[in-house]
Amino acid sequence: MIPSDKKREYYQALIDKKSEYEGIFYVGVKTTGVFCRPTCPARKPKFENCEFYETAKEALLASFRPCQRCRPLSHPNHVSELVRNLVNAVEENPERRWTEEDFRKLSVDASTARRQFKKRFGMTFVEYARARRMGIALKHIRAGDAVIEAQLSAGYESGSGFRDAFSRIMGAAPAQLGKQQILKASWLDTQLGPMIAIADEEALYLLEFIDRRGLEREVEQLRRRTRAAVIPGNTLPICSIENELSDYFEGKLTEFNTPLMLLGSPFQEKVWEQLRKIPSGQTASYADIAKEIGKPNAYRAVAQANGTNQLAIVIPCHRVINSNGDLGGYGGGISRKEWLLGHEKKWAAEEKLE
């Protein structure tokens, strides 16, 4: 999260149109739903209507769309014609899931698009399109408005596009739910970035960072396995995990008590239960976990089970490292894994001193 003093600095840079802040931050304007570069010529919003982001991806995932005046992702002086054309193509159809065929129709080489986007924005084109699509679908989740039908038909340039994006990611539109099982989703702001929590009235099913690669697929799989639709809202487990996460980041909590719904094979669930036994502030290897569950040669299967965990932080897959001491992978990103381990070691050390 950006500190309040830094937000004030960025806001002054926005007012003064300071070009040296180009690429340093983007500003999302709540009243218009767009995000801009620091030198945007448009009329400046009030400070309370601004949200600041250090990357374009963060702004997209927060449901802001690129400003048509300053074109933060396609300004002629900063990006190639290829990038500008692809950004415009996404805006024409934000809910599209891009395939090789889509690139061929535009006479674009997919690898070239990936390389140019990665160099300019720190993310591939597919990641950009996905972030845009997820931002649209998660827009109403963040708001938490109970009048879902109104949100599906308003607040975005294309009501039908917004409805399609919602349906593809979250399931049937609310007006069509009938007696279908319902899971509720909420947007949770945390110190390491926004997360999405999905639960029913009894247990938490999913807790992931919004920008996790493959999040859409995880939600779709969850819908299919539970035969449920996902709509905005709060439940007791969501309120519980929100409070526990707040305490966790403040160093007040090391064990989570929110009820969980584990949806995996018996082997996966055994691995996940073992992960919860790793003390806060400590780590274990995949081989260690395999030995603990009585399958010493199944360390590769343990690694796969670790990667399918859908309850980030609560089931601490971030505490599993390679046998040689390397951090290994993490769905939420290596930098987050490193931060979480450092955070837990710090508070574990302080507890020992008390």
Image (cartoon, rainbow, N blue to C red):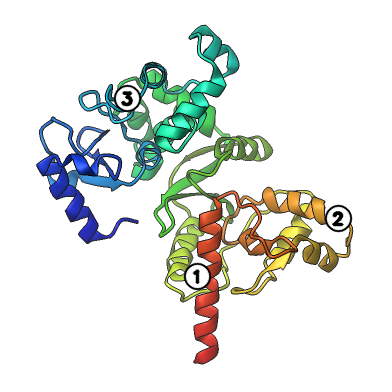
The residue shown at (50%, 8%) is 107
Q: Which amino acid type is shown beneath numbered disc 3?
A: Ser
Q: Which amino acid type is shown beneath numbered disc 1?
A: His
Precedes in sequence: disc 2 or disc 3? 3
The answer to whether residue 227 of the structure is visible from this angle is no
Residue 94 lies in what quarter of the image? top left
Q: Residue furthest bottom?
A: 354
Q: Residue 181, relative to residue 161: is it above or below?
A: below
The residue shown at (49%, 58%) is 236
The residue shown at (56%, 59%) is 337
Residue 164 rendering spot, x and y as whole percentages: 46, 22
Q: Residue 97, relative to residue 49: is it above or below?
A: above
Residue under label 3: 74
The one nearer the camera, 351 or 118, is 118
Residue 224 lies in what quarter of the image? top right
Give the class, few, some or many, for how many residues have Cα within 10 Å of label 2's Cα (few <14, many ≥20): some
Residue 325 rendering spot, x and y as whole percentages: 69, 65
Q: Is residue 213 left or right of residue 57?
A: right
Residue under label 2: 298
Residue 36 lies in what quarter of the image? top left
Residue under label 1: 343
The one nearer the camera, 287 or 247, is 287
Give the class, few, some or many, for how many residues have Cα within 10 Å of label 3's Cα (few <14, many ≥20): many
Q: CA distance from mark 2 to mark 3?
A: 48 Å
Q: Which amino acid type is shown beneath numbered disc 2?
A: Ala
Q: CA distance from mark 1 to mark 2?
A: 30 Å
The residue shown at (37%, 21%) is 80
Tag 1 secondary structure: helix
